[in-house]
């Protein structure tokens, strides 16, 4: 088996979403596995001249080759020549794109005509006009990919509607690595930083502050959660940043929740927050295979989430997590209060979730994706 040279295109500055999966793949690729080809991976990111971010640092720590495409602004056509040069310089066998912009650029630059192309579809987030344009063009982009991986069964029908051939679609859930234990000192320091005492109970939500994540539903349900749980010391912590921040802050003020809802912003290390959390809440209106659910499970935090996208594929309601309908603030509040008041239920969910974490290991993810790369190369070689 020959080495396979893979270029992974990642559109992020933080270590979140698809970037986490690429980094986990990179760590496993560096180990090498018997019976699998060696994957020579390089990661490509985009920059508009901003300072080095945590994603760049994470790539450097792994020791993976890193290339940067520099953009002067939106729809900068000079990135096409940069992409073509980088692909030629690396002698790439496979291009692995991980977002709608990257999908579009691969086809626009014609890179798919000379290399195998694996596109990973993680769903759509319409945050601004630029992204809505890329989302609309995705039907044109993905039709020519050799294989389209997607993070949940829920996205398969969506891809087929965009004229992606069913036999070119493969569901690939996200990986999760067992979490590093959080020390009591770290927990105490974070509690002090947030203004919590040892008796404060914490509901945690982690994710980009964008409309489809349902943070407004969560905030509206929070007053009812405190009432049903009978605990005035209960606090809600939102970790993440995004365009909905101003709206969420205004909603908290209107509901007199400013002192008990903490917007912690983007965090390079979320692990200490899981360490102090009693329950992880996810109120999304749409999802693929959310990392935060797997991260909470790995950290031993019970989960209440909406039954959308790939979440029911990961967890069974009442066995591994509590699942509620989207937009159901009352159901979310009731389920969370029940969980807070039932230690036996919390322990059962956490125990069952450990099995899910063991099945979603980075090694299993690496072997699965590497097999797709191997098959794509074999087809092109013949």
Image (cartoon, rainbow, N blue to C red):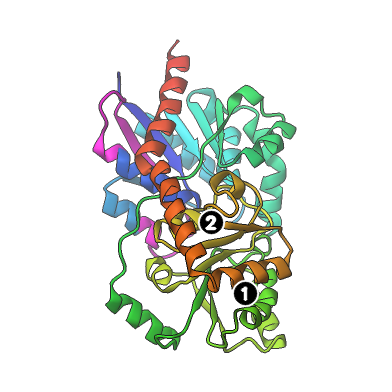
Residue at x 54% of width, y 82% of height: 234
Sooner in the amino-acid sequence: mark 2 or mark 1: 2
Which tag is nearer the camera, tag 2 or tag 1?
Answer: 1
Task: Tell me how far mark 2 sits from mark 1, CA to CA.
Answer: 27 Å
Q: Position of residue 54 (x, y in %)?
A: 38, 62
Residue at x 52% of width, y 45% of height: 79
Q: Position of residue 310 (x, y in %)?
A: 60, 46
Q: Above or below — where is 83 with respect to 243?
A: above
Q: Is residue 51 magenta?
A: yes
Secondary structure state at the residue bearing disc 1: helix
**Tag 2 and tag 1, C-beta contact below 8 Å:** no
Residue at x 71% of width, y 52% of height: 132
Secondary structure state at the residue bearing disc 2: loop
Nearest to the observer: residue 162 or residue 356:
356
Image quadrant assignment for residue 50: bottom left
Task: Name the residue carrying label 1.
Answer: 245
Q: Which residues are magenta?
A: 29-56
Q: Position of residue 168 (x, y in %)?
A: 59, 25
Of the numbered discs in the image, which one, if any, rests on residue 72?
2
Nearest to the observer: residue 121 or residue 285:
285
Q: Is residue 82 magenta?
A: no
Q: Describe residue 327's horizontal placement relative to residue 371 as left or right.
A: right
């Amino acid at each position: 088996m020959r080495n396979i040279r893979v270029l992974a295109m990642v559109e992020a500055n933080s270590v979140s979403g698809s970037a986490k999966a690429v980094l986990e793949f990179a760590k496993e690729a560096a180990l090498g596995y018997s019976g699998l080809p060696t994957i020579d991976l390089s990661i490509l990111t985009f920059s508009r001249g901003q300072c080095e971010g945590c994603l760049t640092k994470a790539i450097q720590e792994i020791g993976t080759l890193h290339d940067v495409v520099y953009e002067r602004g939106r729809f900068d056509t000079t990135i096409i020549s940069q992409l073509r040069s980088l692909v030629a310089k690396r002698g790439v066998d496979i291009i692995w794109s991980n977002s709608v912009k990257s999908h579009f650029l691969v086809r626009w630059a014609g890179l798919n005509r000379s290399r195998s192309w694996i596109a990973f579809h993680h769903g759509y987030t319409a945050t601004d006009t630029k992204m809505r344009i890329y989302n609309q063009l995705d039907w044109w982009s993905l039709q020519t990919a050799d294989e389209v991986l997607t993070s949940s069964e829920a996205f398969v029908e969506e891809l087929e509607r965009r004229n992606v051939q069913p036999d070119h679609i493969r569901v690939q859930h996200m990986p999760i690595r067992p979490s590093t234990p959080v020390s009591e000192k770290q927990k105490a320091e974070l509690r002090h930083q947030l203004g919590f005492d040892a008796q404060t109970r914490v509901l945690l939500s982690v994710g980009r502050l964008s409309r489809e994540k349902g943070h407004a539903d969560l905030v509206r349900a929070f007053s009812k959660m405190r009432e049903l749980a009978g605990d005035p010391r209960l606090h809600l912590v939102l970790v993440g940043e995004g365009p909905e921040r101003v709206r969420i802050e205004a909603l908290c003020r209107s509901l007199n929740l400013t002192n008990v809802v903490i917007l912690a912003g983007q965090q390079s290390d979320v692990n200490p927050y899981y360490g102090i959390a009693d329950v992880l809440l996810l109120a999304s209106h749409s999802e693929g295979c959310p990392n935060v659910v797997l991260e909470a499970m790995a950290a031993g935090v019970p989960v209440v989430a909406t039954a959308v996208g790939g979440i029911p594929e990961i967890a069974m309601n009442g066995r591994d997590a509590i699942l509620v309908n989207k937009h159901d603030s009352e159901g979310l509040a009731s389920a969370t209060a029940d969980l807070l008041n039932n230690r036996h239920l919390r322990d059962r969910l956490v125990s069952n979730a450990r099995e899910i974490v063991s099945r979603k290991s980075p090694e299993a993810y690496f072997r699965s994706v590497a097999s797709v790369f191997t098959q794509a190369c074999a087809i092109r070689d013949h």
